[in-house]
Amino acid sequence: MSAIKDYTGAKLGMWLFLFTEVLLFGGLFLLYAAYLHKFPQEFHVSGKELNVVLGGINTVVLITSSWFMALSISALQQGHVGQSKKFLLLTLAMAAAFLVIKYFEWSAKIRLGIFPDSQVLLARPPGDVIFFGLYYLMTGLHGLHVIIGGGLLSFAYFLIHTGRVTQKDFVFLENSGLYWHLVDLVWIYLFPLFYLIA
Amino acid sequence: MKEQHEAHHITSYRFNAIIWGALLVLTVVTVVAAQFDFGFLNVVVAMTIATTKAALVIFFFMHLHYEKPLFKILVFLTFFLLAIAIGFTFFDIAYRY
């Protein structure tokens, strides 16, 4: 038995969902832009406190994960199931590495008493409070997307493993990949805005 | 029922590696560029590099380059709407302060 798959419809649905994600993050980028305009000096000073090295490593980690994701799809399309699964595991390893690095970054800041509503942060100028508020909100929401994306990719791995996602029927892997690349896209903007522009 | 066959573009490993390399180079460029002070242009430079990277991811890793025109129009429309939202907000902010 073969089911007819509407690939265009399946991908269109995923893209439409991604547009709502772009607008969700877009709203937060709008907030960032407006406050950067209002508190350029405070954003500059606060941004310098973030760890550029860790942020940079995480950028490389996510870009590489996107690469492995694209390779996993290419491999499956060519019928190399084993390779496809290996690339998918590498993508997941990069997702895990990203979260571990993020954990160390956040805990270093939290140990210094810099987190939303903390006494240390509230004693600082309003611009600093807003900068770190946006930092935790936006990287936190992004981190949540990394976790959900990781879950989605794990499920795709399971479906390939059990032969339900195959060379002939790979749209689930492709759509999971689209989600994963969106996670990478958001970070491509978060990195310069929080770690560099300052 | 007749099975429907759609053409799928398969990106080669080699081409994927080139895109990956380009993204890494641009990441280095954006970090290096941040060491210089262009004043107001700092944001413009950083966002231009980020958008170039985003375009590489969208067109090649996300295969938009090989999709039907409908997909391209929708992606353009989404970013156009976002640009309107951000642009119009700045008309307000720029004249308020």
Image: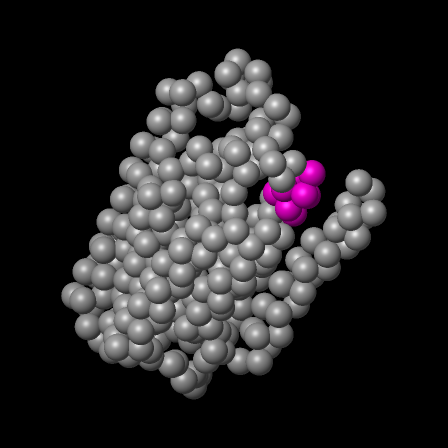
Look at the picture and state if A103 lies above or below A12.
above
> Residue A69: where, in percent of width, then height?
31, 62
Q: Residue at x 49, y 62 (%)?
A: B49
User: Tag count in the figure?
Assistant: 0
Q: Is residue A21 visible?
A: no
Quarter of the rendering occupied by the C terminus of chain B: top right
Position of residue B1 relative to residue B23, above or below, is below
User: Image quadrant of residue B30?
Assistant: bottom left
Query: Is residue B34 something one can see in this rendering?
Result: yes
Find the magenta span and give its range. A30-38
Above or below, A42 relative to B62: above
Q: Position of residue A180 (x, y in %)?
A: 40, 56
Q: Which picture quadrant has residue B6? A: bottom left
Q: Quadrant of residue A145?
A: top left
The residue most toward the top is A119
Residue at 62 percent of width and 40 percent of height: A40
Say whether residue B83 is magenta: no
Where is residue A19? Give x, y as percent: 58, 59
| Foreground pick, A193 / A85 | A193
Q: How is the image coloured?
A: one colour
Q: Nearer the viewer, residue A192 or B4?
A: A192
State the quadrant of the N terminus of chain B.
bottom left
Helix, strand or loop for the magenta stretch, by majority: helix
Q: Residue at x 64, y 26 (%)?
A: A126
Taking the image as shown, residue B40 lies to the left or right of residue A53, namely right
